[in-house]
Image (cartoon, rainbow, N blue to C red):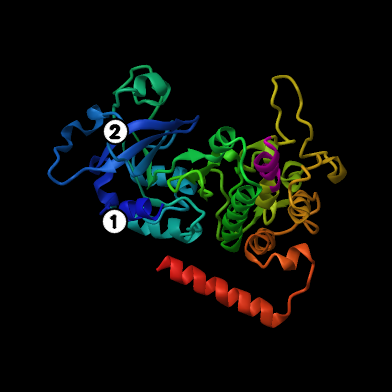
Amino acid sequence: MQKNLTVAERLNLNSSLGLKQFELGSVIAKGNNAVVYEARKIEEDTDPSNVFLKQESSCKKYPLAVKMMFNYDAESNAMSILRAMSRETVPSRSVQHNFSKTDQQWLIGYDHNLIKLSPHPNIVMMHLCFADYIPELIDSHTLYPQALPTRINPEGYGRNMSLFLVMKKYDMSLKQYLSKMSSLKIRDKILLLAQLLEAVSHLSNQNVAHRDLKTDNILLDVSEGNDVCPALVITDFGCCLADKDNGLNLPYKTADTDRGGNIALMAPEVVTARPGTFGHIDYSKADVWAVGAMAYEIFTGSNPFYSYERGKPPLLRNSTYKEEDLPALNSDIPLVIQILIRSLLQRSTSKRLDASFAATICQIYLWAPSSWITKYVMPTSNEVLQWMLCLTTKVLCEGG
């Protein structure tokens, strides 16, 4: 995994050069709002003129992924596109900077109001973002004809330019991984949950709410092999709340206010909120509730808040369920983790664990001396300090 990260980080990427510095490979994924291509930076001695027509098979090494947003509304200029799709850029480490002086003044205001996430091991590694012209690719007429501009497809509805996000290429989504790995070890499942909680804790600490958490939006790096639990990151920030003015409290005066995506995994306080003159929605523990629901997918393979058959309602609804209605978890799941998951799904935010505390519980269970848990022996302060010192030394030595 570290080798992959190094390859991506050492690439000399320049947002002012836009799309012409990349060679695009095969499609990785396509949704309603975007398409993702595997990509690599073009070598300096390569002729970039045929970059979009090559699209050779994946036998080449593509350490990057380029996400092309579908743009139907924003004007075809960089500032309008960045303004319309600003939330997608929240985890980006670099934003397009080849603007005029007037545009640069607007960009300062844009950065001032929008929270920019600092890097974290469990947040998608997004190197840069920029606006550029939609290219004509071999499979574009088949995969997303309506999103193409009329200069490429006369029957298309898309604009000439859109937003491009350049990130590290990951191997698969959490949803794909769980369907593929039917017999995961309990410890690996706890490691996945711990990473997810660490990511949400990082978001909460920086006053950001993702608001669209689901296993499709969780990516994994499985390059270390099946014997090692994969590294996990949260991606797709298009629905996030990252407003410096309001923080995690969103004014909710009208029903037209955007409350986020994935209604099935909206926290109870979000899905039941009613608009009003002084109305607001508190998102401080909304993401962690979604993690609790996804924990059922990780540990049991089934989410009680999802409907898996057309026309059949889900087992529970986020707007009306009661805690005692939550399905029982398997007996092979440690009791402390069972209690943790149920605590994440408390309807009352005052009773619900926050992400940081929940992540700490997982980390202690995973790495602390087993006697602290199996024998319920309360460790002394010196024992805790000695354990933390040993763990820190181990991490530093292995990291070096």
What residue did someone put label 2 on?
59
- The reply, left or right, for residue 300 in relation to residue 224 is right
Residue 278 visible: no
- The reply, left or right, for residue 251 in relation to residue 26 is right
> Is 44 in front, or is 137?
44
> Is residue 172 magenta-colored?
no
- Residue appearing at x 64%, y 43% in the figure: 259
Examine the image and state in which quarter residue 267 appears: top right
Q: Eyeballing the image, is 397 above or below 366?
A: below
Amino acid type at circle 2 is Cys
- The reply, left or right, for residue 76 in relation to residue 303 is left
What residue did someone put label 1 on?
10
Label 2 residue SS: loop
Amino acid type at circle 1 is Arg
Q: Position of residue 47 (x, y in %)?
A: 14, 37
Q: Position of residue 344 (x, y in %)?
A: 74, 52
> Is 68 in front, or is 8?
8
- Residue appearing at x 74%, y 44% in the figure: 275
Marks 2/1: CA–CA distance: 21 Å
> Is 68 in front, or is 385?
385
| The residue stretch that appears in magenta | 292-301
Q: Position of residue 191 (x, y in %)?
A: 60, 53
Examine the image and state in which quarter residue 382 appears: bottom right
Majority SS type along the magenta span: helix
Q: Could you classify mark 1 by the number of other residues whose Cα lies within 10 Å: few (under 14), some (14-19), or many (20 or more)?
A: few
**The C terminus is located in which quarter?**
bottom left
Label 1 residue SS: helix
Q: Earlier in the sequence, mark 2 or mark 1?
A: 1
> Is 6 in front, or is 250?
6
- Residue appearing at x 32%, y 55% in the figure: 102
Q: Could you classify mark 2 by the number of other residues whose Cα lies within 10 Å: few (under 14), some (14-19), or many (20 or more)?
A: few
